[in-house]
Image (tube, rainbow, N blue to C red):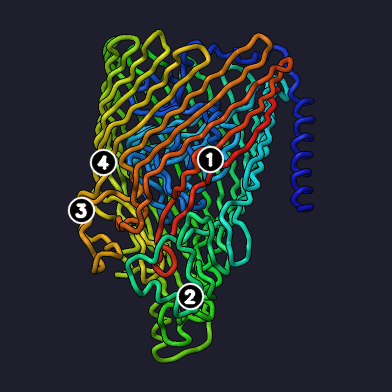
Amino acid sequence: MQHRFKRHLLWSVALFSTWHVTLVLAEEQPGTVRPEAKDDSTLQTVVVNARRRDEAVQEVPTPITTLTGDHLQENRVSAIQDIQTLAPSVNMQFWHAAQSSLSIRGIGNNPRNDGLEGSAAVYIDNVYLSRTGMAAFDLLDLEQVEVLRGAQGTLFGKNSTAGVVNIRTKAPTFYPENHLSVSTGQYGLKEYRGSFSGPLTETIAGRLSLSRSETDGFIKNVYNGEYQGRTRQGLRGQLLVKPDEDFSLRLIADYNDEDLNLTRSFLSYGPLASTQARYQRVGASDPIADPKKLKVNTDGKNGSKVYQNALSAEANWKLDGDYSLTSISAWRQWQFDPYNDDLTTAPVWSNMGATANASQFSQEIRFASPKDDAFDYVVGAYYFKGNVGNNLFYNYGPQADAWFGLPAGALSNVSSRMPSRVSTDSYALFGQGTWHLDPQWDLTLGLRGTYEEKTGRVKRYSPDGSPVTGAALAARNARLGAYDSGNLKISGSSPSVLISLSYKANPNLLIYSSLTHGEKSGGINPTVPNNGASTLLIGPERANDAEIGFKRTLWDERVTFNANLFWTWISGYQATSWDREANTSYLSNVGSVRSRGVEFETTIAPVKGLTLNANGSLIDAIYMDYQDGQCPPETPGSLCNLTGKRVSGSPRQIFNANARYQWALDSGVKPYVNASYSYRSKSFGTADDSDYGVIPSYSLTNLSGGVRVDDGDAQWDISLWVRNVFDKFYYTSVATGAGNIFAGTIGDPRTVGATVSYDF
């Protein structure tokens, strides 16, 4: 306890010291202008960069959800897995940074494979992240999050067949803009955040953002009495160089790390009698059968450590004739180190998992024409270089042979490691232009050509352990025998195409339709193949998407209502399956998938100070051709026809709503209340659509209230909040675990807390 207090004290001193230094540096320079105060009597115009130029979101003919930094802060959303509570058609199965699966419209369920990027892409400050887990940290100092649904690629750096989550952080300002906040809550929750921005010289501004969050957790391991918690911390420094109105250079450096201790909770043995028999053979205590008790029973540690560093430079030039040129250079490194027990009280294995060390470099150049009455366009080039080193390892304990029912000495006290590497080189040329046929009709055409090459190698070394012969040696080699794939290579070219027609019926109604073709390249499985080396190579994923929708503004800009229909067909869908015998996952092309549905969003400002938001989606995502899928354990056989089954990780219904009301009193005191509600119907957590792997439907309600008090040019904000008000029990992911049990990651229970912040 004393050590923890000292750590909190040191962190608070660091925040205070940084605050003091920033106050000195951020004295307002002559000529700097603060943003005007918001007038909340009507809805504010939201500007997005979805088409690589700043536009009002209601003028962009594509389905896009925009979440402002204020909206995210009001709803205590600072992690990518929580964005689904505010946006339609977004779903995320989440355990930790490596086991995270982002899907949009039911497409993108790829929870862990280091040889392939996800179908739904994530960008931070215009930089593509090759792993969803690269965004699985506390997102600092958010300006805005944009969720683009449907195949993207004619403008964004990397191809994506499901959609894009575009995260934008706040840039340095030439006026003081500083924020400090401290939060505390149940389960040992403590959060510290600070951001400090201001001019350093007349032409250079700086911004420093930092955070630390920790929780003791709410799940108790009865074996040792410990609770499972998490610690995250992050730091981002920025410089904005702006010598004149025609040039700007934004430099960003950030660091994040996480130490997570979290065990999936036992759900069931499934239908296989052999699963429960394994526990009996090794003398393990029966798992705690009721996950609602928030307890586990395991003799080892489960969790991970994650480290991330990143640098980026974005330069923008305004050229003669109002043309513009943009260059974005970025480097990022991400390291994941797991520690996984066998989820039992017996020493079956002491640790297993797959480490990952990913690095990437990207360079993008864009040239944009001025906004014109007849035709405007954006053209560019993109290069991406990625390297992923993976090491799948097993450290078996003395009970491994009994657990697997193998001859003595086959696996007990044996260790194995299988390093692999995958390198990616991606090159693309792209362009998109809009013809303004007349004041009402716009025709947009986009084209992208991508060439991508991936090389890799998978090698498993001979296992380390006591020498054995006969049946024990045969069993050991069958599971852990030496293997070398040799050099692997996959390459190919792919087009992305967009055709969009929009009609401005009047200043407040936009009607649009579009046809899109997008492709995501193939990859390399960093695992030992079951049916020859050819199964290590995965083919490309191709998507064809059709959209029709409208965007409507009503009641003197107090109401927006947007809705659209979509139909998407994907061939060669890339999905992760579980090999029960090898106790590992693998990636394959599962055939074709169709996703179709309807989405809507509305925002209403009925009276001054009150804002209402609601959005939702109804999605039907099914396998249209999946004849050789893995059978669920309740079905006899190894291969089953899953054609017509639901795509895993795809809730059929999603609905989100929130309301905020703020009073403005004459004394400068502004009380406010905020409420949000989120619902998602059931989905399948495993690729085989097993009934034992269902994630049941659930809804979450959050409440908060507080008061803002003006203090000269500064402002205090004191709030009380409750997350998951009705203490709903739910899962953020369900998967097949050790010994073919089914295990789930439990979402946070009701949590009460308070936040104090100071803006100055």
Foreground residue among 81 and 344: 344
User: Which residue position is annotated with label 3?
Assistant: 643
**Whole-number angstrom distance, CA of label 2 to CA of label 1:** 38 Å
The residue carrying mark 2 is: 461
Dot 1 alpha-carbon crowd within 10 angstroms: few under 14, some 14 to 19, many 20 or more: some
Residue depth check, mark 2 versus mark 1: number of the one nearer the observer = 1
Task: Measure the C-alpha gap from mark 3 to mark 4.
Answer: 14 Å
* Residue 433 image point, x, y percent: 33, 24
The correct choice, above or below, for 211 with respect to 112 in the image is above
Mark 3 or 2, nearer chain start: 2
Q: Which of marks 3 and 4 is nearer the N terminus?
A: 4
Q: As drawn, which residue projects farthest toward the bottom?
A: 470
Residue under numbered circle 4? 620
Label 1 to label 4: alpha-carbon separation: 27 Å
Disc with the residue nearer the chain's start (2 vs 1): 1
Q: Check disc 1 and give the amino acid type.
A: Ala
Q: Is residue 377 above or below residue 406?
A: above
Query: Residue placed at 42% from the left, 78% from the top?
Result: 404
Residue 286 image offset from top left, x and y in percent = 48, 70
Where disc 2 sits, the SS reads loop
**Which numbered disc, 1 or 4, marks the residue that appears first in the sequence?**
1
Q: Please give the label number shown on residue 79.
A: 1
Q: Residue at x 29, y 35 (%)?
A: 618
What's the residue type where badge 2 is placed?
Tyr
Mark 3: give few (<14), some (14-19) or many (20+) Cα within 10 Å.
some
